[in-house]
Image: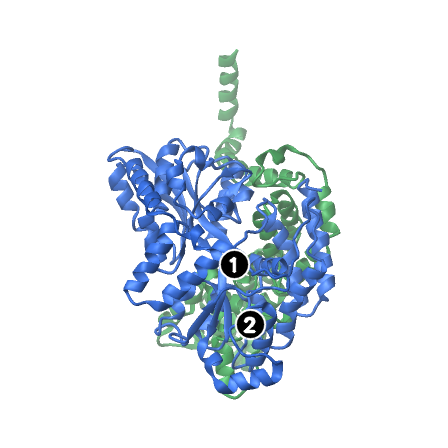
Amino acid sequence: MLKTVIPSVAVLLTSTAIATSAMAAGEYEGYTLRVKLIGGAQYEPLYTLIPQWEEETGATVEILSRKNHFELDREIKQDIASGTINWCVGSNHTSFAPQYGNIYVDLREHLTEDVLGGFVQLTLEHSTVNGRLVQLPRHSDVSNLYFQQSLYDDADNQAAFKAEYGYDLAPPDTWAQVKDQAIFFADPPNFFGTQYVGKDEAITGRFYEMLIAEGGALFDESWNPTFNSEAGARALQWFVDLYEANAVPAGVPNYLWDDTGLGFASGTVAMNLDWAGWASFFNDPENSKVAGNIGLVRAPMGSGGKRTGWSGSHSFSVTESCDNKEAAASFVAFLTSHDSQMVEARTGLLPTRSQVWTDAKAEFQANGNDFLVLVFDTYAASMAEDAFTPPLIPEWIEVSNVLWPNLQAAVVGEKSVQQALDDAAKDAREVMEDAGYL
Amino acid sequence: MKAKMDRRLGRWALRPQSIPFVLLLPAILVIVFVVLFPLIFSLYTSFTPYRLTRPESLWTFIGLRNYRRIFTDLDFWIAFGRTILFLAVVINLEFLFGLLIALLINRITWGQRVLRTVMMFPMMFSPILVGFQFKFIFNDNIGVLNNALQSLGLTDQAIAWLVDGWLAMGSIAFAEIWMSTSVFAILLLAGLFAMPREPIEAARVDGCNNWQVFRHITLPFIMPFAFIAMTIRSLDVARAYDIVDVMTGGGPAGRTELLWTLIARTGYDNARMGQANAMAYVSIILSIAFTYYFFTRLVAARRYMGGAA
């Protein structure tokens, strides 16, 4: 596992040298690089480094947009429609990239293998669409299971759980165990066993990773929807069972990541599947009631023996219409360089450069921050072994939009599990037919 | 030849009967380019499979296919009906609350200016912020409302405000009303300020009680102001999007889906702008109907008050 995560120091040194050489002093003197970047609290610290690139190259960076990714996605689609892609660098995401056709360059033609060799290769694979590396991953996203440690250490809980379920109470390794334990810990409306994001692409993604973990698939090889299979029904039943048992808050069909994160930090939830970006927040006594009481394990397995690992990476792309692609490539290489990624890693964001995993962890160890060491170890393992993306096709978001209302309908009891999946499969088939796959 | 035509055009423009057209020409050109052209263009796209991410699809004509899809799409018509209901409830409640606030502020003799300013605060927030604010207030687990209700002993349940269909629509309506009631209050207050004192004094001399004065003099006088506010707000509410999108996203299971959450998802998230424009053109019927209704009532109200129709 660690072999894929930890590269040689030589690769790091080489990539640093290349990145530095790409920023030869004054190389782009007088040039103005127009960019559209994702905005938001956790994304901003990286942008404080931009003046450094400007100073090195003599170029000026003009930030045209700084919006959340959904708004940025709309703006980019409008630019494509109106033929006004008059900017060079845009924030991107592995789930969104396939929609944009060929507006972005293949970065393998503009960056050397020495630069690209420093990245975790799986993240580069996920960033590739139709054989073209259309984005350079900035940080990655995969979810693992946080839990309140004290609940598992409690002798009364251990005895009661063993008596009721017949096995020892321990941090769960399967989603079936998560269900048992969530129902066991739940004491609504004051305390809940777990929670899940329940709308938009968020629940589609959660269902998708459960489907994979149950041994199912969204589509067959000919792109026929197959998620209304037995595995799909098992995956969706898990969400329904927890909802019906009141083991999750009644509002979960409306929850997104901010709701689940704040819910766990409020101390009213036993287990929470979430990304690493929340780790520091959860362990900060000023923000969180569970600070100092957090355990973390890799995302559990489904009955198919596979762990959930819905993953994606935030990234940067360079447009085909850019009038100075080399400057743009230099800029994205700078923003994803070792030092830049260290800035984001310190906030808990998962780096895409192998060496940053090692160096960030070493820094946490040196500072005595055992919790972030645990976080990085756990997420390194899941990024290396469990991570998988949704199908990298332009229709992913559209398929998601026919899927999630039906998933919600099953959760809130408006449709049976099979009916919801069959309805969604029918609509998804129409989407795929319209797109020419079927 | 060209010089001859220029001379003819110049002579035509200088004729007295041409002058109104010449003077109106800049305004007509602005309207054509800013309003009419985009409207015709978007109408055209509704007859195409236009996708934002595939600009070439703009030139494929598919006739009424988008419209046929809409007319057989039950989800669209449920959203259409829900939008009408939402609009009717929100506009009426905003009118009632706005009227109440305007009448109360009109009675105040000290601090009225400060109160008028404070009253407008909710309007100053972005609808997205208002959406987030109420999303967390109505959160079933960590929301302020449920915690308050549980602390006061009024319930021992975590009420799922944003999950149950009626409660969720009620919560969204609450946020919408909180943000925009002051539109009604301000316009009705303007009406009350403009109201002459003589009819009220005459009515009191004739022995009318407070309710009769309000019902037969004050209310008819401020109704034209109310209908203007209703016209403005009906156009706003029919396009309600930001608050709904943030609070529920149209869910769960489509329980709070309104026209514009559906249209925006179709047009932007799914990038099917042709189909979204067809939906928008059908939904415009709603705005036209409400605007026509309120203008008819406005004209009737002004005629009742003896004003110009």
Circle 1: residue type: Asp
Mark 1, residue position: B242
Q: Which chain is blue?
A: A
Circle 2: residue type: Leu
What secondary structure is found at the residue carrying circle 1?
Answer: helix
Residue placed most toward the observer, A9 or A125: A9
> Are both tags, 2 and 1, on one chain?
yes
Q: Residues within 10 Å of mark 1 (few under 14, many from 20)?
A: some
Contact between labelled residues 1 and 2, with CB atoms less than 8 Å apart = no
What secondary structure is found at the residue carrying circle 2?
Answer: helix
- What color does chain B have in the rendering? green
**The C terminus of chain A sits in image quarter:** top right
Mark 2, residue position: B96
Coordinates of residue B240 in the picture (x, y in percent)? 56, 58
Coordinates of residue A141 in the picture (x, y in percent)? 47, 56
User: Does A217 sit left or right of A369 as displayed?
Assistant: right
Name which quarter of the figure residue A230 lies in: bottom right
